[in-house]
Image (cartoon, helix red, strand yellow):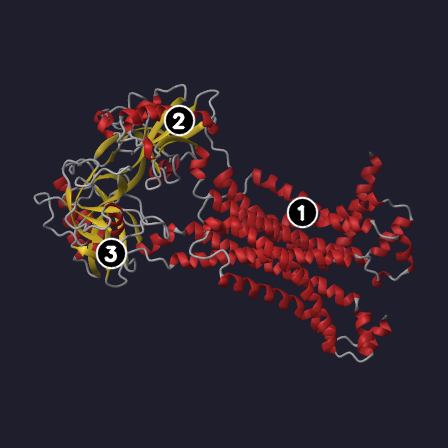
Amino acid sequence: MSSIANEFASDFCYGVRQIRRNRWLTVLSVGVLAIGIGSATAVFAVLYDAVLRPLPYREASRIVFVHNDFSSLLGHAGDSAPDYADLSVHREIFSETAAYYFNDFTMTGVSGSAYAEHVDAVNASASLFSLLGIRPELGRTILPTDDHYGAAGVLVLSNAFWKSKFGGNPGIVGKSILLDGEPYKVIGVMPAGFTFPYPAMQMWVPLAVRPEAFAPDERGNKWLRMLGRLAPGVTIEQADSMLGAVGHHLATQFPDDYPEKAGWHFSAERMQAEQTKDVRQWLLLAFGAVACILLIACINVSGLLLVRATVRNREWAVRSALGASSGRLVRQLLTETGLLVVLGCGAGMAVAVALVQVINTYGPLHNTQIEPRTLAFVLALCAISALLSGLLPAVLASRVSIDPMLRAGAGRTTTGHSRWRGALVAGQISIAIALLFTAGAFSRSFTKLLAVSPGFSPERVWSGSVGLPQRGYAASVSRAEFFGDLVGRIAALPGVESASAAMALPFSSGGYTADIFVPEHPAPRVRPAARLNIVLPNYFETMKIPLLRGRTFTAHDDASSRAVVVIDEEFARNYFPGENSIGQLVANNCCHDRPAVVIGVVGNVVTRELGAAPRPEIYWPELQLSNSAMFLAVREAGNADITSGVREILRQKDSSVALFDVESMPQRIMDSVKLRRFLEWLLNAFALVGMILAALGLYGTLAYVVQLRRREMAIRMAFGASPRDVARLVAQHSLSLALAGVIPGILLCAFTVESTRSFLFGIAALDPVTVAYTAAGLSLIVAVATLFPIAQAARLDPLTTLHEE
């Protein structure tokens, strides 16, 4: 054991001397490894934070979301109150259940400001906290006695909100605050980090479902999110099967609400999968790209070490002649490589920290940190990088033939290493081609996506949200009057071209999908459904949504006149094919006995995602079907910021009403593609790094070839070859290496096309522009890497070179 330790100490000391002796090789190798390891570490930190981190809940792997799955038109939906009641009694499926829905309030009298403040909240069942296994930091959570309709209002604060608004004062527990003008007693504060179900969570209040919500005719209102803990011994597959049996029983009783023949069914999805579904595939793709960067870096360092090993062939021969075994030589070289990798990992950690800060600033996630599990990942990267970088040079060095090496001049002998160097360079080029092609495809796709018309004109449109408290605005007429007067006063502000309001704006929250009834048409196999929106007059004109047929709403379309609706082109195409849709009757789920007349058809509008297939949308006038929460839409005449003016108008009308979610429409559109934009930026950065590393690998090989063949080139020039002829030799060698990387690069491109097809929009698999972009990038790699070795060969002085040789 002591002899092995002594040998390792000797190898270590010798490796340190080699690092100090070959500083250019050390700096280059450490720099390349730092880029590869740092990039991989940063992306893994984001991947772990968003996707891989275990949820901090009791037996989180057994917690599932329960959905209503409808046809492709509706997709995933939540649950109705009767769904929640029916499924909760099936303890053979779920040992515990909980439900919640998103809400918001207007808080007054806390910050000391003259303006009301909006707060994000969740109405949660008392069972939610026990199901998750989370205890409060102060006070208590919601009890079953709190969670019934008509009980006194109580709330639980998030830790961040408690500290920011109440200074972390523990005395807040037991006191009351006003939400929508009603007193709510603070009963507890949750621990730091608990923000379920989303990061902006500020408080939780009781679910307190009203009794009439459990009536049979409420089964179509899927407004709840339901959680369940799988019963002991029940797998998620078994839960799906048992939910299918329960669903079939309900479908026989309520076929209209549970259209089983049209594909409807209950489904369960693990909580982690549900909460990470929006980012999982994107981040896995980014991690695949950064793994390619690390592989290029390791191949690059392996090539550099192979060059160095070739120079040291005579040393290896002498060591072998003195009795060193092949294993001993391999261990020596792996020790030297390990030292380089350790230095590269240290530098890579600094790169990773910087990259994580950049990602937190500009990426879709903002709180990523390098944690202990990420450090464990770095250690694994060190081991893998050491093997990938040092194994091939070590094995080839251990196979050196002693006799030829001791007889020949070390500087003139290649020992067949050139073939391996060429293979390594070709490998780097092939991976760089695949990265460049993928980045080009994503850039083209993103450009095409941004060119998609959203169906309206977003330029110079300001937007903000307003929610009216139940107290004082319970009547439909009072809500309609409030928003009508508010929009009128906003339209009179300086710098305002037009103003209106809607329950849901494109690329924003709000709105919902509702069942639709068409009284004078036969019932289809699948009940019609459409996104329902409620708007004020002048909405379509303010947003510049084109009117195709008929008319839009006016101030005369109020509660005293006949019910009217406006539909979009997709609605007309789906539900009135080949007919004149003007004058048709349409009713929604809550009022199918009181149909409205279609008075107009407008163009399709993108609601959530650019490039998505259009879905039917129907518009009701606010004056006939009012809503308590509306988005303001204001088209500005210039660049004036009207936020302060709108806020002041609200204060004058009702100081308990808050303005929130203020954003321009172009910014809302960019927010909807921020994940795609971040990945496009990341892939382009990785492609650039891959090109640089591949160019370095090609340059290093060509420079070494020029140095190795100096005598040959000098003799050629002495016998009449021109500098151009010698330069052509280097260029031909460079071209052969590039071509050797093209074929595997094309195969890798074909693989990436298949892997990323679902991420692309508006381009073919072999998009000509992307192919041209990739070819230009490859030409640039070869040209830059070849330029200096060609110049070095062309400047060769044959007399001086032959004299030195």
- Residue 157, given in percent of the width and then of the height, sits at 34, 33
- Residue 101, given in percent of the width and then of the height, sits at 31, 34
What's the distance in space between the residues labelled 1 and 2, CA to CA? Answer: 44 Å
Q: Nearer the viewer, mark 1 or mark 2?
A: 2
Which residue type does callout 1 highlight?
Ser
**Residue 384 shows in this picture:** yes
Q: Which mark is residue 545?
A: 3
Report the label total. 3
Q: Which mark is residue 385?
A: 1
Counting residues from the start of the chain, the first of labels 1 and 2 encountered is 2
Residue, disc 2: 228
Per the image, label 3 sits on a secondary structure element best described as loop
Drawn side of residue 172 relative to residue 132, left or right: left
Which residue type does callout 3 highlight?
Ile
Q: Which of 475 and 271 lies nearest the eye of the viewer?
A: 271
Count residues near mark 2 (Cα–Cα under 10 Å), then give few for <14, some for 14-19, many for 20+: many
Considering only vertical position in the picture, is 9 above or below 96? below
